[in-house]
Amino acid sequence: MIQVERADFVSVPVSDLTRADEFYGQTLGLERNPNSSERWVEYELGNVTLALISPEAMGPDFEPRPNQMPIALRVADVAEARRKLEAAGVEFGHETIDSGVCHIAGFADPDGNALQLHRRYAPYRDGSLP
């Protein structure tokens, strides 16, 4: 058995690194890792790093295919975050979902990678909250 220390990063395939960098940094307002380069761009989310994987970093034979399973971005208020993103031109695929334990609003980045705003409001069985 191996002993995994943590997840170092989650790969996000992109076709246009400049456009993706602008979306994740300016539109979403994520914190760019100061050690990122022009070819390898990373954004820090506190508990995980999103690495924008592009032809600039991987070579011209790299064919990015969008992630279909969403990266859930925890926000304090899904409705408010959604309003801000819609004002910035982000389109959402459907109405915000209330699952009975959390609010979820799905959207995609410019390359079609699935993302979602997420906030759990119901406590776990032991009464704790994430």
Image (cartoon, rainbow, N blue to C red):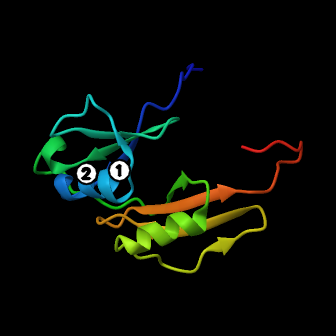
Q: In terms of image quadrants, where is residue 79?
A: bottom right
Instruction: Bin the neighbour count of mark 2 within 10 Å (Cα to Cα): few under 14, some 14-19, many 20 and up.
Output: some
Q: Nearer the viewer, mark 2 or mark 1?
A: 2
Label 2, on which residue? 21
Image position, residue 7 (x, y; %): 49, 32
Q: In terms of image quadrants, where is residue 51?
A: top left
Please give left or right for residue 34 compared with residue 9 in the image. left
Residue 36 drawn above or below residue 98: above
Tag 1: amino acid: Val
Q: In terms of image quadrants, where is residue 66?
A: bottom left
**Image point (80%, 56%), residue name:** 122
The tag earlier along the polypeptide, 2 or 1, is 1
Residue 107 drawn above or below residue 130: below
Please give left or right for residue 102 compared with residue 43 in the image. right
Label 1, on which residue? 12
**Image point (21%, 57%), residue name:** 63
Q: Is mark 1 on a helix, strand or loop?
A: strand
**Image point (15%, 39%), residue name:** 38
The answer to which of 78 and 68 lies nearer the viewer is: 78
